[in-house]
Amino acid sequence: MAVDPNAYRYTDQHIRRQRELYEELALQYLRNYVGDFDLLLSYKRRVEVGAPLTVPMIRATLNCMRFDATVEGLPDPATLPDNVIDFSQRRRELPLPAEVAHRAVRRRPLFIKLRTTVRMPFGISSWPTACRIHRVAPDSHIEYRTDTGEYECKLHWNCKTYWNMGRVDLELLTLDDAYDIVARWQGSAFCKTCDRIQEMRNEE
């Protein structure tokens, strides 16, 4: 199936609107996947051990399917309302932040912490056997590197005090996504340490 690389891609909003349909398509594809793409292989292992797919995982699988010549009849992503901005399509076009533009001429790399709001407060490791849902620490942020012009996510859980994760190592979740995983997968649960730390913060 020939696909225009510039065509509109699936987003998390698309998946949530028709979760049952898209999840079944992704599951069927992953069960029969024989390629060597590490991301899809990690999702395939999750399916094999009975772990649920998160909304971002389903979205990523479907977008990969769009470029697989063996896949036919995949429904086109529905058009989102005009007031919805899909930042995934704008990621490579982000302008240099105004607060750091005047310092970009320096040769030595600068790692500048940008003002960041994480709108998905929970997360789970992408490891196939992961079963604990953690809270994203409030000091998680995005850094800008002046010498390369790259953005890097600096994320960690409440229960982890060091930067030990990158965005590709985990899946961020809304509260609804988190409860959905707990309901679907026996043995999954919220991290008690993360919850306890959050309660202490709320009391401060």
Image (cartoon, rainbow, N blue to C red):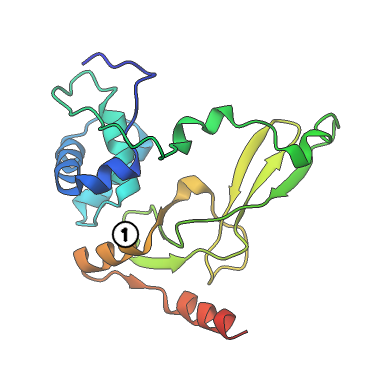
Q: What element carries label 1?
A: helix
Total number of numbered discs in the rendering: 1
Does residue 88 appear left or right of residue 155 in this picture? left
Label 1: few (<14), some (14–19) or many (≥20) C-alpha neighbours in 10 Å: some
- Tell me residue 123's x, y (percent): 42, 60
Q: Tell me which residue sits at (25%, 13%) in the image.
A: 2
Does residue 158 appear left or right of residue 31 in this picture? right
Q: In which quarter of the image is residue 61?
A: top left
Q: In which quarter of the image is the C terminus?
A: bottom right
> Which amino acid type corresponds to the residue marked 1 in the rendered image?
Asp
Q: Is residue 171 above or below residue 89?
A: below
Q: Tell me which residue sits at (14%, 43%) in the image.
A: 21
Q: Quadrant of the N terminus?
A: top left
- The residue pinned by badge 1 equals 177
- Tell me residue 107's x, y (percent): 85, 30
- Tell me residue 70's x, y (percent): 18, 20
Q: Quadrant of residue 201?
A: bottom right
